[in-house]
Image (spheres, rainbow, N blue to C red):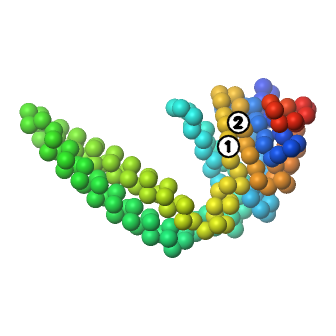
Amino acid sequence: MDGGVDDSSIVASKMSNTVKVKIRPGNSLEFPAICVHCSRPASDQMPLKKRRGRLTRLIDVPLCAQCAAELRRKSGEEERRGRLGRFVAILAGILAAVIGYLISPDGISLLLRSVVALVLGSITGLLVLTYFQRRSLAAAHAEKLAILASARMTNFSWRATTFDFDNDDFAQRFATINESRLMEAAGNGASEH
């Protein structure tokens, strides 16, 4: 992707499918043109997101059309939990807005009281919705969960990112594409390239 990544390195484990990429912000990674889950030709992407303190790293890995379609498909229980979550989030948001309006001091203007109520209601609704969305994922089809688990960003810093891949073929091709940047990972027995 980005040809000028000369101060980057990659670490690959021979004992597992762990690959550590030493890469500076602004540089991009090169991935094989196959699905990270099933090795079919890739035509879509799946975002991997990892948060560490106030920093968030987001990297897209390749996905085939069939796996992308499976990620979009929801089980009946997922749908039910999603509808319930939206309903409860709206109710919680309205309740929080009313409470926020009622407990705000009488000495402030009606506009300011309304803004405080709106902000409190919105934040509460979003928190409740997020909670239900995470809970509904637990009811997903097994294949969807397997696709989501096929690639993980396990760690990152300002200069390195570590991935775990379930697909041996994908991990091998990723290491081959980035062979000039491979180096030994601490404690996993990989050899330095």
Q: Is residue 79 above or below residue 112?
A: below
Image position, residue 142 (x, y; %): 64, 66
Image position, residue 182 (x, y; %): 85, 34
Q: How many numbered circles does the render carry?
A: 2
Q: Residue at x 71, y 58 (%)?
A: 63
Alpha-carbon distance for marks 2 and 1?
Answer: 7 Å
Q: Which residue is mark 2?
A: 161
Q: Residue at x 29, y 53 (%)?
A: 93
The image quadrant of residue 65 is bottom right
User: Tag 1 or tag 2, which sits nearer the N-term?
Assistant: 1
Q: Residue at x 76, y 35 (%)?
A: 21
Looking at the picture, tell me which residue is in the foreground, 3 or 23: 23
Image position, residue 88 (x, y; %): 33, 60
Image position, residue 111 (x, y; %): 15, 41
Q: Secondary structure at mark 2?
A: strand
Residue at the extreme front of the image, as rendered: 187
Residue 153 tag number: 1
Q: Secondary structure at mark 1?
A: strand
Q: Residue at x 68, y 61 (%)?
A: 146
Disc 1 residue type (three-letter):
Met
Q: Are marks 2 and 1 in contact (CB under 8 Å)?
A: yes
Residue 74 lies left or right of residue 187; in this view the side is left
Q: Is residue 44 at all visible to an observer of this figure? A: no
Disc 2 residue type (three-letter):
Thr
Looking at the picture, tell me which residue is in the foreground, 86 or 189: 189
